[in-house]
Image: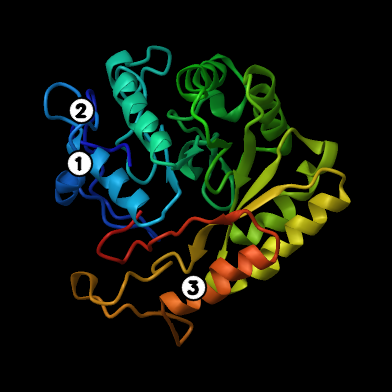
Amino acid sequence: LLAYADFDGTAPGGSEVQRPGEAKPRPVLHEYAPHRDDWQPGDPTWRGERGKGLIGALNYLAGKGVNSVSFLPYNAGGDGDNVWPFVSRNDKRHWDCSKLDQWGIVFDHATARGLHLHFKLQENEIDDDRLGHEAQAGRVLESLDGGRLGPERRLYCRELIARFGPNLALNWNLGEENTQSPDEVREMAGYLRRIDPYPRNIVIHTFPDQQDRVYPPLLGEGSALTGASLQNSWNNAHQRTLKWVRESARAGRPWVVANDEQNPANMGVPPDPGYQGHSGEARQGGRTYTLHDIRKLCLWGTLMAGGAGVEYYFGYQLPEND
């Protein structure tokens, strides 16, 4: 969302190498050009005409009944490698005030249009010094304090809360496919809870096959977390949501549980039939599924399990992807 050409100090990612399980990097920034027509007189811009594409895109989403958007405020070293709040990619202690003012205009408009702001504070590649799905020991220069609660991470949390915390509906997600240790998660969640003057939902996202390892030690009084951001197969949403709704209730602090990413990663949720010539069908394990299956088993599966809702993920092999 924030890899946008109209923002100050924003540049395309440097990598042109396609990593396994990811889309091929595109050395361009979003312009959201088709949505300039969705911008309305009286809507905000900056530096003259800048911002019309993204502001129009938010208008379009709100007009279709969408009420949540998910984004990374920092992804240097990650999939996109094109979003950071700093004056330069590697300068974690000096923040870009003009860029952040522009982000603020966008977030304020999203709030005015009834869109919940899902801040995914980190992604797997840069949340700590552990590498990949197996969390192998290494060194990640882009990580904040190597995953610990040090000065870089404290500054990051404080700045985001101070600048964007007053928006009416948001949550803080500690990280996408997070591999920080339980103690590191507790420290970060606890710090967010202490410094945020608003009772925000604090959640964490993890690999589908690591939920049963990551979540249990964080339930109840085990952390300041108040929810889970689930990634699992689209047709398993009911079972996984119900599990963590029940487990968190048993632990004495019921969690807000949402389904935020649908596997398989290459397909996720298929686009509407006819979009850019797409059939509207996707395949998983030899089975074809469509938006109607997503609605029945993912959306309603989540809601009927007591889940908070669904954010749709579009897979890396689709024309428009994450």
Residue drawn 36% across and 46% down? 79
Local SS, label 2: loop
| Residue where numbered disc 3 is placed | 294
> In this image, 186 relative to 260: left or right?
right
Which quadrant of the figure has residue 97? Answer: top left
Give how far across and how far down residue 263 sits, in percent: 50, 66
One can see residue 13 in this view:
no
Does the CB distance between marks 3 and 1 fall below 8 Å?
Answer: no
| Residue where numbered disc 1 is placed | 39
The coloring applied to the image is rainbow
Q: Nearer the viewer, mark 3 or mark 2?
A: 2
Local SS, label 3: helix
Q: How many angstroms separate mark 1 from mark 2 (CA)? A: 10 Å
Does the CB distance between marks 1 and 2 fall below 8 Å?
Answer: yes
Q: How many angstroms separate mark 3 from mark 2 (CA)? A: 36 Å
| Residue where numbered disc 2 is placed | 45
Earlier in the chain: of badge 3 and badge 1, it is 1
